[in-house]
Image: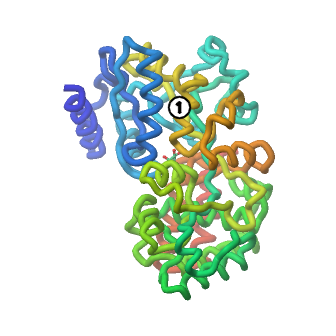
Amino acid sequence: MRSSRRAAIVAAAMAALLPVTACGGEGGSGDNTVEVFTWWADGGEKVGLDALVGVFDTRCPAQTFENGAIAGGAGANAKQVLASRLQTGSPPDTFQAHAGAELVDYIAAGQIEDLSSSYDDWGLREAFPPGLIDNLTYEDKIYSVPANIHRANVVWTNKQVLAKAGVTQAPTSMAEFVDALDAVRASGVTAPLAVGTDWTQLMLLETVLITVLGPDEFTGLWSGDTDWRGAEVTKAIADYDRLLGYSNGDRDALDWTDAERMLMNGRAGFQLMGDWEAADLDAMGFRDYYGYFTFPGSGETFQWLADSFTLPRGASNVDGARCWLETVGSSDGQREFNTKKGSIPARTDADPVNYPPYQQSAMADWKTATQVPSCAHGSACSQGMQEAANSAVAKFSTDHDAAALQNALAQAAEQFATS
Ligand code: GAL
């Protein structure tokens, strides 16, 4: 019954992508079900979501969770459906949105409600670090509750592949990384670096940009303080193209999980991906077989992003959505979710002892490393800029026209300048 209702909503949302002029309609569930809209449909992402739902069930016994997840890494499919539902006044009861510039898109469009008073009621102002609160705040109001902090600039490895190639140490510079890629290729792995579709390519480009420009100038690319047309960006694109030369030719057709399978079955030795990969590899029983290191040359930098949950304007089960949001911000909710999701808690009161080894190292780094945002995951740039950047790297994946890529990124930054 519930799933057919959801199917109907999704069908309506997809239909709304067509040029239909009717609008309005009721959003949300209209009863005690809480439709939670994410893209955490499979693998480690779903394991994380399920753990959070377990806490929700305990804390909110009068409410029933309804899974509105739409598969596709980084929300590639979900965001399109969500945009349509928001436009047609048919929102879910709550949806996932990244802290930072992406959240501002929803706020500026008047699509989500102010949660400032709930922050006071639930003691959340003290629970999260001030920098994160800043990234969630717009014109003195707070519009979402963060579930976690993810790190984007991590390289995951297949230990057996690296051992066979004689790669015994994590590379710490671009030159060492290229040597390691050469060694793995020489051992018989033709595409040592597993890469997927556009947004995964944007992640790789961003990490190279961090390495070449350093954290401050990298952050300046998104604030308008660093020139996209500068010589260092040209160099970063050249390095990035070099890395693409070690990757799989079918990258444009692969989601991050497909590229991850290449790593798991030994068809690649390395993959740059956010630390949701730890959760996914663990969920598939691969924990003893993978290694990880921060992208060579960006080790002192923590490229962060945060998943947060919102209260959409027009949600029909507001009480249920609030109970979900309170669960998301709670200590037990954050612990159950983040121990499974590969991320670290946004709350500052978590005890590392409760976390797997990877998250313990990320929790330590979060305190000491320089924090930079991610455009591929919405903390650095608006959705318009993100779409333009994804298109530009996808084109580059085929034509390798470095000047055109740099120009497209510079033009997009001008077009979508936020300040
Ligand atoms: C990110 C999201 C993560 C993870 C990843 C891959 O945008 O913040 O939680 O789900 O996409 O799908």
Mark 1 crowd level (few <14, some 14–19, many ≥20, 10 Å Cα) = many
Instruction: Give percent across and percent down for residue 247.
Output: 51, 76
Kind of residue at disc 1: Glu
Residue 27 visible? The answer is: yes
Name the image quarter holding residue 57. top left
Q: Is mark 1 within 8 Å of ligand 1?
A: no
Residue appearing at x 67%, y 36% in the figure: 353
Rendered location of residue 386, percent (x, y): 54, 54
Quadrant where the image shows the C terminus: top right
Q: Residue at x 46, y 62 (%)?
A: 260
Q: Which residue is mark 1?
A: 336
Display colour scheme = rainbow
Residue 333 drawn at (x, y percent)? 54, 26
Number of numbered discs visible in the structure rendering: 1
Front in this rendered view, residue 110 or 300: 300
In the image: residue 297, left or right of residue 120:
right
Relative side of 354 to 171, left or right = left
Q: Residue 227, relative to residue 380: is it above or below?
A: below
